[in-house]
Image (spheres, helix red, strand yellow):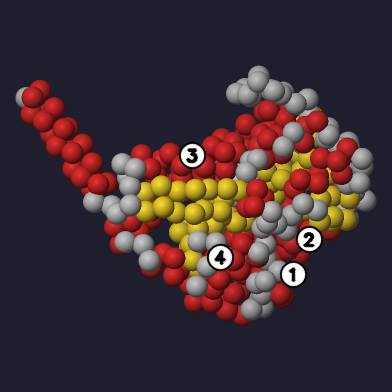
Amino acid sequence: MKHLTLAAAALFAATLSAGAQELPKTNLKVVGGLSNLTAYQDYEKPFWTKTIPEKSNGQVTAEIKGFNEMGLKGPELLRLMSQGVVEFGTATLSYFASDNPINEAIDLAGLAPDAQTARKVTDAFEPVLAKLYGDGSNVRLLGISTYPAQVLFCNADIKSLADLKGKKVRTSSRTQAEFVEAFGGSSVTMAFGEVVPALQNKVVDCAITGSLSGYSAKWYEVSTHLVALPINWNQQIHAVNEKAWQKLDPKVQAFLQTNIKGMVNDIWAAAAKQTQQGYDCNTGAAACPFDVKGKMVLVTPSDADKALLRKVLEDQILPKWAARCSADCVASFNATIGKELGLAVNK
């Protein structure tokens, strides 16, 4: 019996190996997300440079650089993929919000209080975005992943959302700006790399980013208070130029689709865990798995603050978003995300 089991295992391994060997030699060029963040360092880069070559027995290889390493800002990535200048690319959806507000739909401030809801919302709306990019941009959507929860880092004493009044807050999307303004703060737009000196020099009082992204970028050195209330998530698309995709062998396409799906699932599975790690490491909690620990004060939101965020979503953020999105876009929201969360938006 034991011999049979070993033989079966050997046959299975040989079949896998044969499957990988059948893939034609293929080299891919990938423009990844921000290279100094965990999503890129722990998932994207190893996926393209180790997982893909290993699983294909060296038949499929890839070169990857973060878009920031290539001198890009981010918002131009969809256009560059559309033109075929970039083959495979990763980009944060909020970068494209000014081109089309439909790109904000899955990540409006207050929409998803936890990672599970954020995934549910993303999965519900993904077919809408896939059709949009395929029809209008010649871009094939391969998956949507996420950063940890986007939260407030402040170099100021802050105990509740009401304390945002009069504060200057760095935001990275329109919906974050509307969230800040709803509480009487003023929104400041600046690149991720400029935030540390801005917090240090009090150019801004607070800044919003992923809890672990802020830790990776050492925001704990220049801020004192961390508000543990997920505002939004900053999902990223993983996509490819359609013409570049069609040039690939169908077996390579199937191989990539399966494995990219695996990478996206891994990133989502880590989102809640990494959100907590961000809280732990920025504040120096014993549970932090890393050597360097911050000394920030963790501000735990009250039930009143959570309810307030939901109210701001329904009364201000959703109506403002609906006003700038098309009737089709609003109808798509209601039929997917709205249905999942019991929300209805009027155009």
Report which residue position mark 4 lands on: 85
Spatial CA distance of label 3 from label 4 is 23 Å
Spatial CA distance of label 1 from label 4 is 34 Å
Above or below for 282 versus 163: above
Q: Earlier in the sequence, mark 3 or mark 4?
A: 3
State which mark lies toward you, 1 or 4: 4
Q: Are marks 1 and 2 in contact (CB under 8 Å)?
A: yes
Q: Earlier in the sequence, mark 2 or mark 3?
A: 3
Report which residue position mark 2 lands on: 178
State which mark lies toward you, 3 or 1: 3
Spatial CA distance of label 2 from label 3 is 36 Å
Q: Is residue 248 left or right of residue 179?
A: left
Viewer-proximal residue among 13 and 209? 13
Report which residue position mark 3 lands on: 46
The answer, for residue 118, to whether it is visible in the render is: no
Amino acid type for the residue under numbered disc 2 = Glu
Q: Position of residue 109 (x, y in %)?
A: 69, 56
Q: Is residue 7 left or right of residue 117?
A: left
Q: Position of residue 40 (x, y in %)?
A: 57, 43
Q: Can you say which quadrant of the picture contains the N terminus? A: top left
Amino acid type for the residue under numbered disc 4 = Val
Q: Can you say which quadrant of the picture contains the C terminus? A: bottom right
> Image point 79% across, 58% down: which residue?
177
